[in-house]
Structures are given as structure tokens and as C-alpha cells.
Image: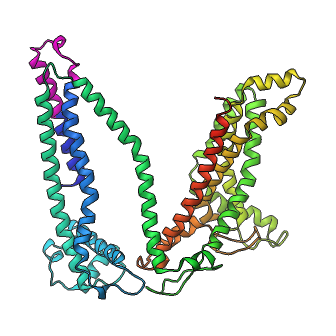
Amino acid sequence: MPVLWLVIALLAIGAVGYILGRGRALKSAGGDIRKLHSLPSYYGWNAALKALVPALLLLVLWSLAQPFYINNSVSGMIGDSEISDGSNRGLVMAEVRRVADGLDNVVAAGLMSAENAQDGLADVAAITQQLKDAGQVVTSEITQPVLAAAQRYRVMKGTGNLLMSIAVIALALAGMVWGVKESHFDFWARNVVERGIKALLIAAASIAVLTTVGIVFSLIFNTWEFFRLYPAADFYTLLEWAPSFSGRGGSSDLGILPLLWGTFYISVVALVVAVPIGLFAAIYLSEYASPAVRGFAKPLLELLAGIPTIVYGLFALLTVGPMLLTVFGDDGFGWMSGGRAVMTAGITMGIMLIPFVSSLSDDIINAVPQAMRDGSYGLGATKSETIKQVILPAALPGIVGAILLAASRAIGETMIVVLGAGAAARLSLNPFEAMTTVTAKIVSQLTGDSDFASPEALVAFALGMNLFILTLGLNVLALYIVRKYREQYE
């Protein structure tokens, strides 16, 4: 049973449990609601929660554990001869899963019979061609062991899904019966339901933390696989980025330093544009603008934050780049040879970051107590002197935190860089040359017909790990500074 239909069945069981639990509680009280310990709805929710929560938890745990069990069972069918240089068992198993999913898709589309998909004596070349013709992702010619493992994978997956459906529905029915049996007029249903809701809220609050942990472990494991295939010393010391997709074990120069330099350079240009404009806009809106002007200008300024980054990228490609080229190109100073350059991406990214800096700085400046302003005015200071000597120094830690948050946002930007800065990985001080960033190379390394068993594809995870560490450090530093600022006035 598909997961969607399984969830719908669980919701139906929960609804039935709610109705039966509520009705049984009222019946036990002779229809007199005053004899019930709790409101009738609590008895219904008690039965519904007992039916839904354990069953959904089992569904999630089973869905997470089943792939690991199947992988471990099927990987034994992959011999050492299938693991070539530059590859490993985990990458071959990824190919097995792709073949299994491809077989499922072509069978579901009616392009192949179920019997042929499971035929252990089927022609491997014909199966490979059928999958490719159907648009399924097949990275190479399928071998007989890979096909046999994929067929075994399909059988185990189908059996596991069937057993999961039976177990989940049985647990939901058992929970519903348990909740309905508890529905008696003297049962403390409200207390049980409120404890259950509290537990659900705690679980919901933990999802963000668990998601972060999952992302980190995914990056760590795949980065470890990359460094098993490619020397870490070369990755952090080489000054050239020249990936080669000539096949598994092909020679490549995968130095991260040119990418880090491009990321840093473009982010600095963006901050040079965004910080002064955003800070001056925040000062004007918080200290000089009338309520009517502020009510109009602030939402209009923040509208920039709602524009998709792909639109900013097109703006960089079609407007900012040609405009810079007319001034700094061959017809001007002669410094710029093309529209794609660090300045193109940096200026466009800075425009995108203006509302980010201005909104945070505006909130921080407004948080400065009015008493500090009044004291400065009482000593004879003008408005500009008060802003320079009182308000900005008091708000400086928070403003620095806002700038660091904007910097982390700039470092993680992708589409503006792809369209505005080009794809050249180089170490150069010329802001009118094309460069690229870590995020842009992550996209390019995982786009197209890549050999996922090669270091050139796995390097995307190593790049992502370094980018994650960099942005995490900036975010932690920014939050620390903002928290220290807030402690002065709370």
C-alpha cells in the first residue's frame, strides 16, 4: 500500500476512534455530561491519539530502518569484481537502487511486464536500453550482478512495504480499541490528552534539531567517502579547480581555494553595496521619516526580499552586466571583457541584501531606549550628533550581528552567482573578471550525466561540508553578538 493511502487509512481509523470514544463515554454517563470527568471531546481525542500516534511513529521508524536492512541484505550479492577503482560498495549500491527504481517506474508505466522485470535470465543489454529509452537514470551499462541485486531489492522492498502496512494498521486498530475501552465517565481523559499534546509539541520542536543533525551526518559520511578517494591535503592546498569526468579513477585537480576566494570576494562586494545603503536606509526610517513615509517606504523596501533569486540572476545577466560593460568594457576603461564578473554578481547580490540589512538594523536601532535619546537632547546635542554618538554606538553590536547574518546569506547564494559571475575558478584580485563560488560548483558537479562513483561527484558533499561550517560559524557569531546586545536592555 502506498504511504499516502496508508496515512489516509490511519486518519480514518483515528476519526472512527474519536467518534466511538466520545460516544462510549457519554453512554457510560447515561447521556449526562455533568457526570463526566472531562469534556466528551477529550475522550474522543484520547482514542484518536492512541490510534494515530503509535501507528505513525511505527510508520516513520519502519520507513527509516527498512532501506538500511535491505541495503545490508542486498549488498552481499555485489562481488568485489563489481567495485572498480575510484568506487566503493556504497556507490555501487546506489546504482542498484537506481536500477530498482527504474524497473518500478517502467513497470508502472506499462513499458515492461512485471515478469520480465523480475526475470533473472533477462537480457541485461535489453533491460539497460529499455530503462534508458524510458528516461530512467542509468549511469552505465548494467551488469548481471547489479541487475540481480536490483531485482532482489524490488522483492524485499515490496515485501517490506506490505508487512509495514499490515503492522501499522494493526497497531492503529489496537490503539483505537484501547482508547475506546478507556472511555468511561470516571477516566481522566483531559489529563491524558494534555500530556499527549505536550509530548507532541516537544517532538515537533525537536524536528529542527534532528533535521540539522541528519544534514550534518549526511555531509560527514559523504565527505568521508570523498576523502577516501581523493587526498585531503590536495583538496585544501591545490590552487586549481579542474575536475575530470573521464571515468572512475580519472585524474583531477580539485582544489577548494579558488572557490573559497571567489565566494569571499563576491560576498565582500555584496556587503560593500548592501551595508551602507541598508544602514543609511534604517537610520532614515527609524530617526527621520514621518510615520506616513515609514509606513510606505519600509514595506516597499522589504518587497525586495520577496523577489526570487533567479529573477535577481536574470537582472544581473541582462541589466547589471551590460551596464558595467559599457563603462568598464572595451568602449570605456577596457578593464572588463564580458558581462559576467565579480562586480556583476556582487552588486546584484548587494541589492538583494539591502532589505535584509535595513530591516534588521531598523529593528535594532528602534530597540535603543528612548531615554538615551532624550538624555542626549537634554544635553544640547543635535539629532545627527545623537545618532552618531549615542544611538549607533549603543546599537553597534546588533548591527554587526545583522551584517554577519547578511554575510552568511551572501555566502550561500547560488543563482545570482551562476548567472552573474560565470563559472571560472581562479585566484585573482581583478573584480571585473569572471569567478565562481562554492555553491555554484556544488550545482555544476551534481548536474548532468555525472558518474556518481567518482570523486568529481562526491566532491560536492565536501564543498557543502566546508560551506556549512563557514556559514554556521558566521551565524553563531552573529547570534552571540546580538544576544550580548539584547542583554543590555532587557
Question: Seen from this angle, which residue lies furthest right?
Answer: 380
Q: Position of residue 414 (x, y in %)?
A: 57, 61
- Left or right: residue 254 compared with residue 204: right
Split into 4 quadrants, where in the image is the N terminus?
bottom left
Q: Position of residue 187 (x, y in %)?
A: 17, 23
Q: Quadrant of residue 334?
A: bottom right
Report the number of numbered marks: 0
- Left or right: residue 338 compared with residue 259: right
Q: How is the image coloured?
A: rainbow
Split into 4 quadrants, where in the image is the C terminus?
top right
- Left or right: residue 216 compared with residue 359: left
Q: Quadrant of residue 384?
A: top right
Q: Kindly identify the residue that appears in the image at 70 percent across and 56 percent down.
A: 270
Residue 215 appears in the picture as rendered: yes
Measured along the vertical axis of the image, is residue 214 above or below residue 43? below
**Magenta stretch: helix, strand or loop mostly:** helix
Residue 352 appears in the picture as rendered: no
Question: 280 or 227, which lies in front?
Answer: 227
Q: Kindly identify the residue that appears in the image at 9 percent across and 19 percent down.
A: 27
Q: Kindly identify the residue that appears in the image at 23 percent across and 74 percent down.
A: 74
Q: Quadrant of residue 24?
A: top left
Q: Position of residue 456 (x, y in %)?
A: 49, 78
Measured along the vertical axis of the image, is residue 239 above or below residue 339? below
Measured along the vertical axis of the image, is residue 9 above or below residue 89? above
Q: Position of residue 225 (x, y in %)?
A: 43, 74
- Bounds of the magenta span? 16-41
Magenta span has 30?
yes
Q: Kindly identify the residue that appears in the image at 65 percent across and 73 percent down.
A: 258
Magenta span has 108?
no
